[in-house]
Amino acid sequence: MAIDKSIKSILIIGAGPIVIGQACEFDYSGSQAAKALKSEGYKVILVNSNPATIMTDPSMADATYIEPLTTKFLERIIEKERPDAILPTLGGQTALNLAMALYEDGVFEKFNVKILGASASSIEIAENRWKFKEAMEKVGIATLKAHYVKTVDEGIVAGAQIGYPLMLRPSYILGGGGTGLVYGDEELVEKLENAFKASPTQEVLIEESIYGWKEFELEVMRDNDGNGVIICGIENIDPMGIHTGDSITVAPIQTLSDKEYQLMRDEALLCLETIGIATGGSNVQFAVNPKNGERRVIEMNPRVSRSSALASKATGFPIAKFAALLAVGYNLTELTNDITGSTPASFEPVQDYVVVKIPRFDFPKFPSTDDVLGTSMQSVGEVMSIASTFTESLTKAIRSLEIGKTGIRNIDNRFINLDRLELEKEITVPRPRRIFAVLEALRRNWSVSKISNLSYIDEWFLYEIEKSFNVNQETTPTTILKMLGWTEDDIDNKDIKDELSKNRVYKLVDTCSAEFLSITPYLYSTTGTEDDDISSNKEKVVVIGSGPNRIGQGIEFDYCCVHGVDALKENGYEAIMINSNPETVSTDYDTADKLYFEPLNWQEVEAVLLREKPKSVIIQLGGQTPLKLAEKIVEKGYTIAGSSIEVIDSTEDRELFQKLCTKENIKQPISNIAANVKELSDSVTQIGYPVLLRPSYVLGGRAMRVVNNEIELSNYLDVLSKSDEDGNPFNSGPLLVDEYLTNAIEIDVDLISDGTDVVIAGILEHLEPAGVHSGDSTAVLPPYSIEEKMLTEIKDKSIKLALSLNVRGLLNIQFAIKENELYILEANPRASRTMPFVAKVTKNQIIKAGTLIMLGHKIKDILKDTDYLSSKTNKIAVKKAIFPWSRFPAEDTMLGPEMKATGEVLGIGSKLGIALNKAYAAAGVEIGVKQQGIFITLSDEDKNKFLKTIRKYIDLEFKIYATEGTSEFLLKNNIESIKVGRADDEAPTSLTIMQKDLISLVINTPTFANEYTDGWKIRRLAHDSGVAVVSSVREAEAFIEAYVESNNALVDIGVIQDVS
Amino acid sequence: MYKKALLINQEGKEFTGWTTEDFHPSTGELIFNTAMTGFVEILSDPSYVNQIITFTSSHIGNYGLSKTDFESERPRINGAIGTSFTTSPSSWRAEQSITSWLKEYEIPYSGGFDVRSITSYLRDEGSSMFAFGTGLNSSELKELLEKSINIIGDNSALTAGRNKYDTNSTRNKIGILDLGAKQSIVSVIKNFGFECVFVDPKTTAQDIISLELSGLIISNGPGDPRSLINVVDTVRELIGKLPLFGICLGHQILSLACGLSVKKLNFGHHGSNHPVMVSGIKNALITSQNHGFTVEFPENEFEHSNFGKITEYAVNLNDRSNEGISIWKSNAYSVQFHPESGPGTTDGLKLFDPFFQMLGSKVGN
């Protein structure tokens, strides 16, 4: 080994907030790497702005900074910590881009920081399309044929050289205008002209089109000695043209012969060598022409990626951990394969099972977006499944999605009802549920070649699924039925059903197809006759995870599961994890004592419980997913840890909850339940507009909306009907109808209770008015504007409620304050989205304490025996939500009661202004870099409210820009402003002032209107150009505080290890 | 209609699969192979003569069969066991399905097995002779086992090769002592621009010398190397007389010829992912392996009275077993794995370099 002894401290940059394309897989990779380096004795310095991560737990690193991921803050941290080296390849594209920017700014040179893993120049080649292409061609690796052209004539020549179909890509465009496929000369001339117009440089890239080619990815590891191994080959079922993050993928590769695979392997290794990736994990993406096997390398990521996380989970090989160890000089031949505990890491894992990954989408939250899948990733989460055949694995993956589908034979009604032409269209145009259209076609006995021609899905996958539709359940052995993806749900005959269940066995993921004995209990269920088993005599506790990430249920709940598991392990229990999400830390094989990678469906969960016979089952940590299983768990005689089923019922059943609140004298907004249109209209009449509507039993405020009048009401019912497969808005349960509290302040309370004592872990005050979903709003901990008397009332009522409910474990309560009156909005007897944030800021390990309570421990003992609840802090923290707007360019960025955020960032400081300033910076709004101006556009009823605040901005010497109406109103109030025109007018307009960086804030009260109004354009452009947008006086006031602390924010940084 | 396919050994250990086919029962040493691609190569590799292969990979035959992948002209195994066999392959290279090809040669195969339970059994208990059939009960199958040949002492390598040898025009060509040589070895030689001829393994050393070959590759092949006493004697006489390169069985034969001993491995190495450290090469090679016997190399290199210093040339990093020897003074060396790939990585191709260098000027016209 050639370990660089000069390196003692290493900086790791995290990936920041969860966004589409960069989710908790980077928490997984960062945590693995930090752990590995720390245990090797390095001082690990870690920076991440995302508080809901395991990697930012104090124990993971020596110095952890939860600070904005901007070059300014990073330079400050580097200056302070003076790390010997930086490892930029573990925090996704965010970390890589930041490292490159710091390198270009000369920061590394200035502070003598060495870049590990890959040199700046090799990162640059890998990241630059054209340089990458040239480098590949030099060593004989084929890339896409492509030419830049500046005239139509050049285009025709280039087109002839490349051959049709062609892809046109105008240079330097936003949003894909002028991009398109071309099939012939005439079309080329026509479309080229448009493409030239679209490009500001009048330049167009003409590329060969590979839409419909097969897509593959190889996960490669390499060390300083030149050892290179392929950890996993992934094949996309969906063809090129659909982002791999949005594709259904399979591992190992299924449809390549050894000859073809080896050529690809050689090229992948040569690619890394050529680019100069010295050590670590990279992934290389290939396209293969199904007609003749022609191959192109598409791109290479010189870093750990989403696919590496999937590959790690698919094979059991810890890519990120080894990437970190290789970076400091170890090599693959001297590291041991963790899973077997005996063989070296320099071998290539093999699989005796098939892994299927299916992405999960949240399009109904983005109603202006057409849900066609393309080259820009739009999925918000994914599930992975493991089984001995492709078809069984596909069925398990579908079950894991938690979309109410039980497998390949449970086809969406909306496809069953389609006629031939409609179904053909659904197969041709890729949308989130296309797989069901394909299944329906197979069920109708359409030929495999026809379906393959329409979808570009390789025939092999279709043949395998087709087998399932061609067998008779009465005459086929259950072993075969199960291998073909049949489940208990597909079979009516009880004997056959029972026999099918008996075929369920549990096997290990062991990297070696059982060639070597494995010591790691990482299990999946599949068809078979014998179990692989590793069991202990410890008291077992099962933790049910949160399943695929979706908006409203994401990394926060995985954080809670991991903390729960840690608490169990620290207190002598055997922790057993069940989860289906490959991106998570909870599904790392060394997080729990035993891991079941399984769908979180009752059938699969029950089978695990039957096998493990746990003392208790924890359902409070994984969000709504495990809560839904509570009743069945109890029915079958298992014990739910902590709060009983009655507690859950009392909070979820409106009537019971109402009774309870009345009893405890806690005020509620008027609320009703409507099971049909008649009841709905009666409720609305009783409550009066505006009302808040939502379906029952959903998380993240899905389909939640404030409705102001009849028209909006019928529009809302239309939306619900469209997202139901039978077109019935009441299908998935009744609608909840609530009085909507206007201009109220929303409060979140997180607490733990053992039935006797209550510890309030945190009270959060939201900046945005109630009505903006709590997951989307900016939250301040502790409250900054609530009077002491009200705070006391909040605490008292929280405690009363917790005790009255008889909560054992965790409780989250949402309150609203309106006109000095406290209302309760809801209570959830489980971990909440805000608990990781509270735990991180206060350093109190509330999830761990809560977990112990669930198992019968008392708060007074926990206080005595552990340090879980012993911290105090004087810091102020602000959580800001992060939205996927850039992925959905058609959406309005306006916030409402339906949650749209994918992630969150934390700003922390000694004052509210500092914390908010940092939270803004972490969210992409760097206050103070633009000119001192604000732009105001208000609706008439709001204008008066803002006058006082606007004067404060004037005192701070802000220039005021305003639209005509607002400007006139201001003038009447003796405030001078610069009048700007509407978006389509001549400059200056509301848009040009942003483009010219003249303003740092937009004060805009949104009006509910059609899309693409000026308001829409202003909000979109503000988001794209890093300008803050606020819509309430509270937010506008808070922005001033953030503004005045601009200079102090950069100074007030510290490691969370000594937050006090 | 599905029927049971039964796999049973002398101890009565049974595994059950499900098949829609009828086939003649067969017997063979049950082994497992962990490769995830290269099924045609494996099935047609003469080294598998008298063996029944359990494929640990889930789906066998997805991309069908292309004759260019053949390691010999027909399937050489006695049976194939798997989770699932593909009858409708999908690939632009596919000429037919693997299943139809196996049927053509009346070779039994069946999916529907719990292959992992078989692998675990073989790993823990060692490989053994199994009988495989449909329509027969346990005792009928066991009877077949009594008549089957034993892997210990199996000398089928003598007839596993081409069995048709042309000794005209051999001068300055590379000879392949054909114990069941894989086509990939021939392809590598040709790709490097050399010509080769096959040599009958029953040829005497004198006759081989008179062929005036530029060098001799001792090929891979099936069975127990210790039963090939004449071949070992022949090779012993050839050491130092012309450049020698042993592959797999050839490695074991060269080792036996140097006085080293060979033993049976518990369950063998069969797969495409084994890391091997070769002396003089900095990084580990990911190699293709297929052998049930292994050379026992002493702790240190040693001096052979006739051939000079013999060193351990390569080591398997999984279990530290021997993967090669070198006798550079006598222009001879050998490797246990398959540097020619087919199936497997191309990492090992560079292992032919020393051999080609040894040929020196004696290279064909």
Image (cartoon, coloured by chain):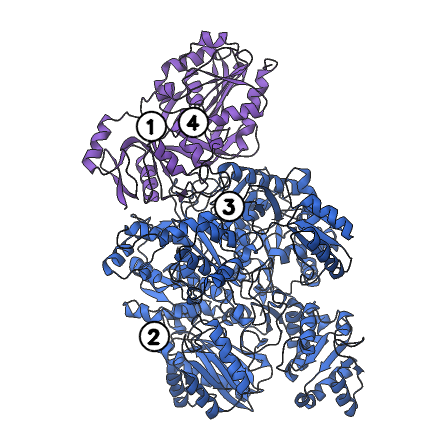
Front: mark 2 or 3? 3
Q: Is the N terminus of chain A in the top left, top right, bottom left or bottom right quadrant?
A: top right
The residue tagged with tag 3: helix, strand or loop?
Answer: strand
Task: Give the letter of the chain under mark 1.
Answer: B
Q: What residue is shown with label 1?
A: B50
Given residues A1042 and A157, the one toward you in this image is: A157
Q: Earlier in the sequence, mark 2 or mark 3?
A: 3
Looking at the image, do the residues carrying marks 2 and 3 touch, with CB atoms under 8 Å apart?
Answer: no
Q: Mark on residue B73? A: 4
Task: Give the letter of the chain under mark 2.
Answer: A
Q: What residue is shown with label 3?
A: A233
Bin the neighbour count of mark 4 within 10 Å (Cα to Cα): few under 14, some 14-19, many 20 and up: few
Task: Give the letter of the chain under mark 4.
Answer: B
In this picture, is A646 found above or below B46? below
- Expressed as whole percent of the image width and height from the top left, the position of residue A374 reads 58, 59
In this picture, is B263 found above or below A839? above
The answer as to whether the residues below labels 2 and 4 share one chain is no
